[in-house]
Amino acid sequence: MIGTARHSRGLYILDDDTSYSSLSRVSLLSSYFSTSEQDCMLWHFRLGHPNFTYMQYLFPHLFSKVDVSSLSCDVCIRAKQHRVSFPSQPYKPTQPFNLIHSDVWGPSKVTTSSGKRWFVTFIDDHTRLTWVYLITDKSEVPSIFQNFYHTIKTQFHTKIAILRSDNGREFQNHNLSEFLASKGIVHQTSCAYTPQQNGVAERKNRHLVEVARSLMLSTSLPSYLWGDAILTAAHLINRMPSRILHLQTPLDCLKESYPSTRLVSEVPLRVFGCTAYVHNFGPNQTKLTPRAQACVFVGYPLHQRGYKCFRPPSRKYFVTISNMVIFIKVKNKIVVALDIWKCVCLFTPCEK
């Protein structure tokens, strides 16, 4: 007890009792702080919990016998706590496919022509080589990872040791957990609300979307072709120098460990969205039927050595080799399909 008081005309007057005179000058903080520390904390509360360093500048006589580092305020901790910035992790080369980063992007507001709304990425930590798979629903992730695991095991004669992802349900489920346990793969997940711990996959998603957005903005292709733009972006990023790899491309880094791999095929690069005339292989050809049909170049197929083209009127895809497609050039500049709907009207008979 600090003291007693009596009520008088709406005020509480402290009793001037010698037994409580000494106690009245001591607050509840006296059990935790000395007299000097008590005064410092009193002014700390009066001034609205400022930094003790600023208080030392304002009241140097109060801190003459007090160490600022010894003072602590519970209210300040609870009211002003913030997240410390995450330190950047240096690149540590190990072995290809020892650590795989993965993340799921989506859903997209626009569905692709094949009904895809998400894509999942798998990034090798050593080579930073990126695999992208378009998916209809996030529940497809376990089966896609199993196929990816068997592809790596068959083509490169190695096994994935660690899978790193976030805590999404597409990764935290019975099917995937059972498969990882059966193969001895360690599944490392980020803490809740901490996507920074899965930074490699998060930054790769951003890079893919930025490149795909640039490809789409350079043309006027319909937005439902965003999936082809994402796959083309992954194809190009794998062939571009990386600062992490000391300006080496991910494919070159992979070929250092697997020089005889035949999984990667190369074709000359073309401008995404440019006009391409594909040889007509359709049935019922006559001598007066056009021998080529105008399409739009939309990327590179994964397991075929050719070009992927899209025909707007029929919304069909064609994969053809280089000697069966002609990319139009006018005045040394590639013709880009700037208006896809004009292209539709051009190849669709108009009777109105």
Image: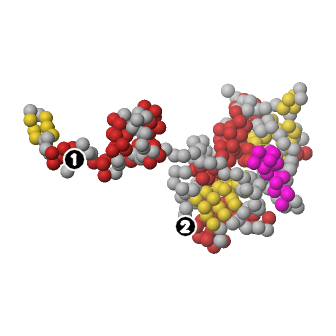
User: What is the basis of the colouring in this image?
Assistant: secondary structure
The Cα–Cα distance between marks 1 and 2, rounded to whole angstroms, is 65 Å
Can residue 290 be seen here? The reply is: no
- From which residue to which does the magenta span run? 241-257
Graded by Cα atoms within 10 Å as few (under 14), some (14 to 19) or many (20 or more), the crowding at tag 1 reads: some
Q: Position of residue 294 (x, y in %)?
A: 80, 37
Secondary structure at badge 2 equals: helix
Relative to 314, say whether 339 is above or below: above
350 or 66: nearer the eye?
66
Is 350 on the left or on the right of 83, as rendered?
right
Residue 96's image quarter?
A: bottom right
In the rendered image, the quadrant that contains the C terminus is: top right
The label on residue 23 is: 1
Q: Give the amino acid at mark 1.
A: Leu
The answer to whether one can see residue 7 in this image is: yes
What residue is shown at x 80% (from left), y 47% (from top)?
Answer: 246
State how many labels appear. Answer: 2
**Residue shown at the point (88%, 61%) measured from the top left:** 260
Residue under label 2, please give it.
174
- Nearest to N terminus: mark 1 or mark 2: 1
**Crowd around label 2: few <14 · some 14–19 · many ≥20 (10 Å):** few
